Structures are given as C-alpha cells and as structure tokens.
Image (tube, helix red, strand yellow):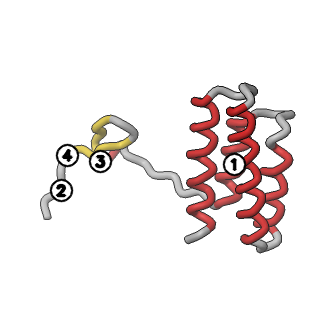
Amino acid sequence: MERTEHIWLDGTFVPWEAATVHVLTPQQGIDGLAALVGAGHPLLVKLDAAKASLDRGNETSALNQLGAFLNQVNAMVQSGQMTAAQGAALTAYCNRVIAAINL
C-alpha cells in the first residue's frame, strides 16, 4: 500500500510528519472532561467519584457514575441550565471516556 503525503486529522489535511495522536487513560479523559465543565460546577462531584472508582479499580462503579453524569447533563439541558451545544459536547466527550473504560 502506498503512503499518501497527508492525513485527514481534526477536519483538515495535515502532513504525516505533523500529525500527532495523544492516548489518554480513562482517568486523564475524566480530567479533560472536568476541565470542560469548569471549577466549582456541581457536575464535578460525579466526575471526581468516577475517577476515584477507577483509581480503586472499580470500573462498574465508574461507569455508573459517568451514567449519572450524563443523566444530570441531560436534565440541565432540558431545564435550560445548559445549552444543547454544551450538553452535546459534554455527552460526546463522556461517551468517549466510557468507550475507553469498556475496551
């Protein structure tokens, strides 16, 4: 198979030499999600609990806590406390963390 000059990455073509991929642990993914949520936000309680569960090796508990996070995000969107776009971004990110745990 012949290698191309460019690769499609994040919506644009970039040279292979410039393309980088960052692999995160689920805990690092939760940290990134927490950064999107912002300091002091009530959603952080569920993310902190999920990360602590992962640190203890309890993936089932972490998945349940992330499910509760998603439920709370949905409720916040439905009540107007969060925009649909914000909710969609948090949901997509959280689902990637969940997928990583389920590998």
Which type of secondary structure does the marked residue at label 2 adopt?
Answer: loop
Label ID, residue 3: 2
The residue where tag 4 is placed is 5
Tell me residue 59's x, y (percent).
Answer: 72, 70
Label 4 and label 2: CA atoms lie apart by 7 Å
Tell me residue 4's x, y (percent).
Answer: 18, 50
Tell me residue 96's x, y (percent).
Answer: 56, 54
Where's the N terminus, which quadrant?
bottom left
Q: Please, what is the three-letter code of the amino acid marked with disc 2?
A: Arg
Which type of secondary structure does the marked residue at label 3 adopt?
Answer: helix
Foreground mark, 1 or 2, reads: 1
| Extreme residue in the left direction | 2
Mark 4 crowd level (few <14, some 14–19, many ≥20, 10 Å Cα)? few
Q: Please, what is the three-letter code of the amino acid marked with disc 3?
A: Trp
Tell me: residue 81, above or below residue 99: above
**Disc 4 and disc 3 in contact, CB within 8 angstroms:** yes
Label 4 and label 3: CA atoms lie apart by 7 Å
The residue where tag 3 is placed is 16
Label 2 and label 3: CA atoms lie apart by 9 Å
Decide which of tag 4 and tag 1 comes sooner along the chain.
4
Q: Which of 59 and 77 is in front in this view?
A: 77
Decide which of tag 1 and tag 2 comes sooner along the chain.
2
